[in-house]
Every structure is written in structure tokens, then in C-alpha cells.
Image: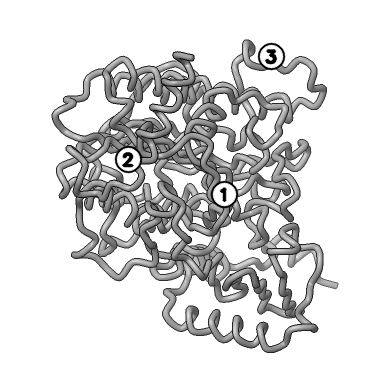
């Protein structure tokens, strides 16, 4: 009886909190935004996986499962969309990722989420992967609004040496750090320390960006032993990496509880893109001889593609007393929506930057209001695009041989039936929309970077045979 009364009271408090306007809260919430890296949609317990994620599952059960949450198809574009609230094609980060040898980064005239939250009085911290520019310090996190930074700047590092291509990539506040340890556990340790030392008089924005379970697939032996039943080496390591990350998420939640911050903290969890289904997109380390273990469930394809498997990601939101337990949001929202949603909750302003593509999703997440998002822009690139309006989704490959696909996601979320020939008017409408978006896009910085590198190689030397070879070849 007492348990039933407590449960009813908690539910009533959640419902009441959901309907309170932002301005009615005593203080802006702490925000802990957790991002996994290349995690498959199905690779959590609450989506039916055999991978054990009890802490993530608990957050989902006690909060809101965001079942039509979209990100960009790859790492850099998704992180840029979160930081700006704007689609990456607007500033040239829409294609692939920032490679290890590249020197460009997120455009300096883009106002970032930590800058907006800093203006609202927040302490801002990034613990984990950045991947929005490393070749020039002007792109580094401390120059883009974060008060504190810890972890790697690149897109992919070894989990034990903390290096890529022989170069250590491990920093605290922009200064190199040499320390031993498994990356996932080091990030968890630092996030916990940050929470333990935080001045609770000031709201905290913690962007906890794990590198797991991005390749290379590496995990401590103790975690590998938990999955001794999995015979495939890559799949076993991948599962172990996710469980190791889940344990660190549990430690972060416990640290918030120990500081009596949990009831005043919104936690968001998501993957940056769908899990990879091809070795071509796992990263810079060659995985062509390995199994690619991510599982996107019934969704088509994976990371790098514009199909649902590459862009519809596992996601949740949890805030005790503000989001009712067991909430399921099955309407579209996009990673760009997090900028105005979080800034609105913080009591900040989205003014002062460029026009946002994101929409405030708090009424949808917290009290079931219809999603204001009627369109999802999956990506717009010179050679391909995908746009969704309502339940109609166009996937358009522009390069020859070109291909046009139309899917009705209401009846075919797995994108198995191309109905373009049956609905030419809808195809035309969505193609026109994609073309309008393309007209306002910035050419991909990766292509400019790549052309420059190739030009230097192809036009900066001569490939004639050596003189000895030419002389030997004379009759």
C-alpha cells in the first residue's frame, strides 16, 4: 500500500511538472547530455538486445523513449548539428567526417550550444570526443564555449594508447595529458569528478561524449569475460564496450544522486548515428577482415547511409518529476532540435546566432504535445539527398546512375518497397524541396580539403620512369 501511494505520488508530481512552464521552475536544470558513438539502434536492452545495458534501460523506463529521434548519418555532422541547432549542409560539414589530417572545423561564425548556455549562467564542460576541428586551436572546445575540456579531439583513437596514427590525442583544457587507462573508464572517472566538485549554486551542462562503441573494438578482459558466450570476436568486444559504457553512465547517475543534483538534472542519451553495417564507414582503422557487429534492428542499412538504419538512433530523455516514467515519444524529432529545447529549459535565448533549423521539443517530450516537426532533412550533399515530409521519405542519389526512391514510413519503416513510380507528384514535391535546400548549402569542406590534397600529389610531382629505366628500354 505504501509503495502504491509513493508511486502514485511520483506519477502525479511528474504530470504536474510536465505542465509547468519553463519560467515556473525555481532554477534552470542541470543538463547531462550523453552521446555514444556508432551504437546500433537495437543495441540496448530496452530494444531487445542481448547486450546488457541496465543503467541505460533504467533511464529509459523512468523517462521517455524517443523512438523517432534522428541524427545525421556520420559523426562530425551529428555533433555539428547538436552544437549549432542547424543542419550541417548550411556550413559545409555535411559530407563524411573531419579526417585526422584535415585542418578545417566548425565554422567560427556559428553560435554554439555551450556559448548559449554559458550566456544563461551555466558551467559548461565536455568530457569525451569532440570531432569538430583539431588542426587549429581556434576550433578546439575551449574556444567554442566550453569552460572545461577533457578527452580526444579526433574522431577515433586506440582505447589504451589514446593515439591515432602514432600521435597521442588526449587533452585536458587544451593541454596534452599522459595517463594510463581504458578510454571509457577514464571518461567516466572524469565526469564523476566533475560532478563531485561542481558548485551546485550554478547549473551544469555536461556533454559526455563517449567514444564507445566506435572501432577499434577493444574492451577490458573483465568485460569480455561477461560475453564468453559470444563466439565472434568483434561482436563480443562490441558488446563488452557497450556494457562498459553503461557502467560508467550508472556511476554518473550515482554521482548526481550523491550530490543531491539528480532531481534537478535532465539526462539525454543518444547515439551519434546508426551502427555501421560496412567496414567502409567504421573509421580510419581497417576493419575489412572483421565482422561489423552493430545491429540496427529492422531498419535498413547503417552509418553513412541516408536510410533509417543510418539516421534513426537510440535515444531517451529522463528528468525525475518532469518527465513521466514510461513515456514513449513516437513522433519525429531531430538532433538539431536539442539546441532550442535545452536553451529554452535553461532560460536562455536563441537570439544572437543564425536562424535555427531546430524546434523546441519540450512540450512533446514532457507532456505528449504533437511534434512540431513536419519535415526531417536527413542530409543534402552535391551527390545525394534525403528528405521526409509527413510519412513520405525521398532518398535521391544524384550521381549517375541516378536513383530515386520513395518510402511510406507509416507502413514501411524498414524501407523495403520503393513506391516512387506510384506517387510521382510526391516525388516531384520532395525533389524540389531538396533542390531548394541545396541552393542554400555550403560546398562540403571535406571535398575542398580532399581536392587540395589530391592536387598537391597529382600536380606537384612527375610520374615518369627513372632515367635508367628509360635508357634500358631504348632499342
Give the numbered dot on residue 17: 2
Q: Is residue 289 above or below residue 370?
A: above
Q: Does residue 202 appear to the left or right of 287 in the view shown?
A: left
Find the distance from the CA under tag 2 to the CA under tag 1: 31 Å
Crowding near the residue tagged with mark 3, few <14, some 14–19, many ≥20 C-alpha atoms within 10 Å: some
Q: CA distance from mark 3 to mark 1?
A: 26 Å
Mark toward the start of the polypeptide (2 vs 1): 2
Q: Tell me the residue that label 1 is attached to.
A: 273
Question: Which is more foreground, mark 2 or mark 1?
Answer: 2
Residue depicted at x 50% and y 24% = 161
Considering only order in the chain, which callout, 3 or 2, is on the residue closer to the N terminus? 2
When the figure is inspected, residue 40 is found, relative to residue 158, above or below; the finding is: below
Looking at the picture, how far across and down is residue 25, in whole percent? 21, 41
SS class, disc 2: helix
Q: Which of the two residues, 169 or 374, is positioned nearer the viewer here?
A: 374
Report if the CB atoms under discs 2 and 1 are less than 8 Å apart. Answer: no
Separation of residues labelled 2 and 3 (CA atoms): 40 Å
* Observer-nearest of 255 and 236: 255
Q: Nearer the viewer, residue 217 or 379?
A: 379
Q: Classify the position of the C terminus by image quarter.
A: bottom right
The crowd level at tag 1 (other Cα within 10 Å; few <14, some 14-19, many 20+) is many
**Which corner quadrant of the image does residue 17 belong to?**
top left
Residue 130 is situated, as x and y percent measured from the top left of the image, at: 40, 43
Q: Report the mark closest to the observer, 2 or 3.
A: 2
* Residue at horizontal 27 percent and vertical 69 percent from the top: 354
Q: Disc 3 designates what residue?
A: 226
Location of residue 178 (image quadrant): top left
Secondary structure type for disc 3? helix
Provide residue 336's location: percent of width, then percent of height: 42, 58
Report if the CB atoms under discs 3 and 1 are less than 8 Å apart. no
Q: Kindly tell me whether residue 174 is visible in this rendering.
A: no
Amino acid at each position: 500500500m505504501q509503495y502504491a501511494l509513493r508511486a502514485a505520488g511520483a506519477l502525479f508530481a511528474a504530470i504536474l511538472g510536465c505542465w509547468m512552464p519553463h519560467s515556473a521552475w525555481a532554477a534552470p536544470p542541470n543538463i547531462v547530455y550523453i552521446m555514444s558513438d556508432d551504437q546500433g539502434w537495437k543495441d540496448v536492452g530496452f530494444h531487445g538486445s542481448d547486450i546488457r545495458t541496465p543503467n541505460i534501460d533504467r533511464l529509459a523506463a523512468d523517462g521517455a523513449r524517443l523512438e523517432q529521434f534522428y541524427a545525421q548519418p556520420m559523426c562530425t555532422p551529428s555533433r555539428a548539428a547538436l552544437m549549432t541547432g542547424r543542419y550541417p549542409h548550411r556550413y559545409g560539414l555535411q559530407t563524411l567526417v573531419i579526417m585526422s589530417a584535415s585542418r578545417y572545423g566548425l565554422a567560427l561564425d556559428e553560435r554554439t550550444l555551450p556559448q548559449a548556455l554559458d550566456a544563461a549562467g551555466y558551467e559548461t564542460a565536455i568530457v569525451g570526443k569532440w570531432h569538430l576541428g583539431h588542426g587549429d586551436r581556434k576550433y578546439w572546445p575551449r574556444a567554442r564555449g566550453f569552460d572545461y575540456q577533457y578527452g580526444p579531439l579526433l574522431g577515433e583513437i586506440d582505447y589504451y594508447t589514446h593515439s591515432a596514427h602514432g600521435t597521442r590525442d588526449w587533452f585536458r583544457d587544451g593541454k596534452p595529458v599522459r595517463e594510463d587507462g581504458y578510454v571509457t573508464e577514464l571518461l567516466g572517472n572524469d565526469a564523476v569528478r566533475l560532478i563531485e566538485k561542481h558548485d551546485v549554486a550554478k547549473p551544469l551542462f555536461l556533454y559526455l561524449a563517449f567514444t564507445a562503441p566506435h572501432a577499434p573494438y577493444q574492451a577490458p578482459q573483465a568485460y569480455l569475460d561477461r560475453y564468453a558466450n559470444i563466439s565472434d570476436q568483434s561482436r563480443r568486444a562490441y558488446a563488452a564496450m557497450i556494457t562498459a559504457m553503461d557502467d560508467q553512465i550508472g556511476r554518473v547517475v550515482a554521482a548526481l544522486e550523491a550530490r543531491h543534483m539528480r532531481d534537478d538534472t535532465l539526462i539525454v542519451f543518444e547515439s551519434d548515428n546508426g551502427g555501421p553495417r560496412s567496414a567502409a564507414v567504421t573509421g580510419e582503422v581497417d576493419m575489412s577482415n572483421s565482422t561489423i557487429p552493430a545491429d540496427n534492428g529492422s531498419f535498413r542499412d547503417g552509418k553513412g547511409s541516408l536510410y533509417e538504419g543510418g539516421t534513426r538512433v537510440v535515444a531517451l530523455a529522463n528528468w525525475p518529476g518532469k518527465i513521466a516514467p514510461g513515456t514513449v515519444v513516437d513522433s519525429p524529432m531531430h538532433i538539431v532540435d536539442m539546441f532550442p529545447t535545452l536553451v529554452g529549459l535553461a532560460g536562455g535565448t536563441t537570439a544572437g546566432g543564425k536562424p535555427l533549423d531546430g524546434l523546441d521539443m519540450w512540450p512533446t517530450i514532457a507532456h505528449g504535445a504533437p511534434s512540431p516537426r513536419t519535415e526531417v532533412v536527413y542530409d543534402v550533399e552535391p551527390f545525394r539527398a534525403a528528405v521526409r515530409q509527413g510519412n513520405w521519405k525521398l532518398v535521391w542519389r544524384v550521381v549517375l546512375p541516378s536513383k530515386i526512391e520513395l518510402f511510406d514510413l507509416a507502413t514501411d519503416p524498414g524501407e523495403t518497397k520503393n513506391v516512387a513510380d506510384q506517387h510521382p507528384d510526391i516525388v516531384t514535391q520532395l525533389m524540389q524541396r531538396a533542390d531548394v535546400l541545396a541552393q542554400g548549402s555550403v560546398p562540403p569542406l571535406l571535398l575542398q580539403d580532399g581536392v587540395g590534397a589530391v592536387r598537391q600529389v597529382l600536380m606537384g610531382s612527375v610520374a615518369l620512369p627513372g632515367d635508367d629505366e628509360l635508357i634500358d628500354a631504348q632499342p
